[in-house]
Image (cartoon, rainbow, N blue to C red):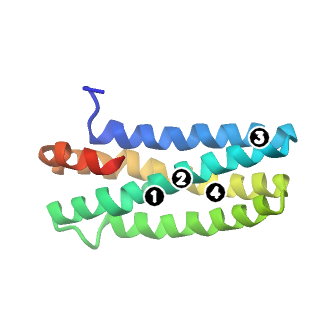
Amino acid sequence: MSTQNLETFFIADHRRCDAAWAALESAADGGDAPTAVAAWREFVDAMQANLRREEEVLFPAFEGETGMTQGPTVVMRMEHEQMRAVLEQMRSAAQLGQWSQVLDYGDTLMMLVQQHNMKEEGVLFPMAGRALHHRWPELLPRLG
Ligand SMILES: [Fe+2]
């Protein structure tokens, strides 16, 4: 998309994860195991891709450009670890086919995600969008 910039790219990535969660919720409620497994994989893939794009591309670029290595990215990385821990609990439950358990953990995860995303979308992405404006054409291909 020609109108896409750093901020809108990462916000869209969050919305993809939200949509994958909604799909997982309805698949797990539906009671059809193969559908739930497929939705689980899509969800965990979307989440992990988002964490990776932020941790391996966005945060290092932001830190390098601004020199802020002890700032918001430290908090965001810590929160990602909390999110990963809950994702692992979800994975164990999914492997056992315990879909109501998956959804319970998922509710906890999405509470963390919501608060986390608010900080990224409200503070970090706008800051990064300004700081990294000139580097966006170079960063975008690394976010696939
Ligand atoms: Fe994040």
* Residue corresponding to mark 4: 109
Check the image and report above or below for 81 versus 61: below
Q: Position of residue 5 (x, y in %)?
A: 26, 36
Report crowding for label 3: few under 14, some 14 to 19, many 20 or more residues within 10 A (C-alpha).
some
Q: Secondary structure at mark 1?
A: helix
Do callouts 2 and 4 mark residues in contact (Cβ within 8 Å)?
no
Circle 2 is placed at which residue position? 47
Local packing at callout 1 (Cα closer than 10 Å; few below 14, some 14-19, many 20+) is many
How far is the residue under mark 1 from the one under mark 3?
24 Å
> Closer to the camera: disc 1 or disc 3?
3
127 horizontally vs 100: left or right: left
Question: Which of the two discs, 2 and 3, labels the residue nearer the N terminus?
Answer: 3
Q: Return the residue nearer the eye: 87 or 138.
A: 138
| Residue extending furthest toward the left | 134
Ligand 1 near label 1 (Cβ, under 8 Å)? yes
At 74% from the left and 66% from the top, the residue drawn is 92
Q: CA distance from mark 4 to mark 3?
A: 21 Å
The numbered dot on residue 51 is: 1
Q: Which quadrant of the figure has residue 53? A: bottom left
Which residue type carries mark 3?
A: Thr
Q: For marks 2 and 1, give the CA distance.
A: 6 Å
Gap between marks 2 and 3, in whole Å? 18 Å
User: Is the residue under label 1 in contact with that under label 2 (CB below 8 Å)?
Assistant: yes
Whether pointer 2 and pointer 3 mark residues with C-beta atoms closer than 8 Å, the reply is no
Q: Residues within 10 Å of mark 2 (few under 14, many from 20)?
A: many
Label 4 beta carbon less than 8 Å to ligand 1: no
| Residue 66 image offset from top left, x and y in percent | 16, 62
